Image (cartoon, rainbow, N blue to C red):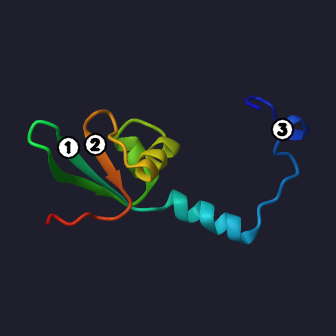
Amino acid sequence: MFGRTGENSPLFGILHSEETKTLMSLAKNKKVFVYSFDSLSNETIFYKSFNSCSDAAKELNTSNSTISKYIDKGRLFKKKWLLFSNAISSN
């Protein structure tokens, strides 16, 4: 798939529906909240928010899809960061 362009591309001629385009746009532009996690004290501390996965990916030196995966799975990113699409309360 990689490097294949034009008629050789597996996506050649495929058109996305308006609904799919909207969903892709929302996923790309979802706000990202980053929290640091201290495993010794088991504390989660707000670090920074980003207006999109792209902005977060640039700051954290990774790809948009990696940011989305960690948000969806709720796993610890780079053994330090928790990523959310909504702010978490400090209760």
**Are circles 2 and 3 on residues that touch, CB within 8 Å?**
no
Task: Pick the quarter of the image with the N terminus.
Answer: top right
Instruction: Work out how far the residue at label 2 is from the one at label 3, CA to CA, in angstroms.
Output: 36 Å
In the image, which disc is placed on residue 9? 3
The first of marks 2 and 3 along the sequence is 3
* Foreground residue among 47 and 87: 87
> Residue at image x 83%, y 40%?
10
Q: Secondary structure at mark 2?
A: strand
> Residue at image x 29%, y 57%?
49
Q: Nearer the viewer, mark 1 or mark 3?
A: 1
Q: Amino acid at mark 2?
A: Trp
Instruction: Work out how far the residue at label 2 is from the one at label 1, CA to CA, in angstroms.
Output: 6 Å
User: Residue 85: image x %, image y %?
Assistant: 38, 60
Taking the image as shown, residue 17 lies to the left or right of residue 62, namely right
**Are circles 1 and 3 on residues that touch, CB within 8 Å?**
no
The first of marks 2 and 1 along the sequence is 1
Task: Pick the quarter of the image with the C terminus.
Answer: bottom left
As drawn, 87 above or below 58: below
**Are circles 2 and 1 on residues that touch, CB within 8 Å?**
yes
Q: Amino acid at mark 1?
A: Phe
Taking the image as shown, residue 89 lies to the left or right of residue 52, namely left
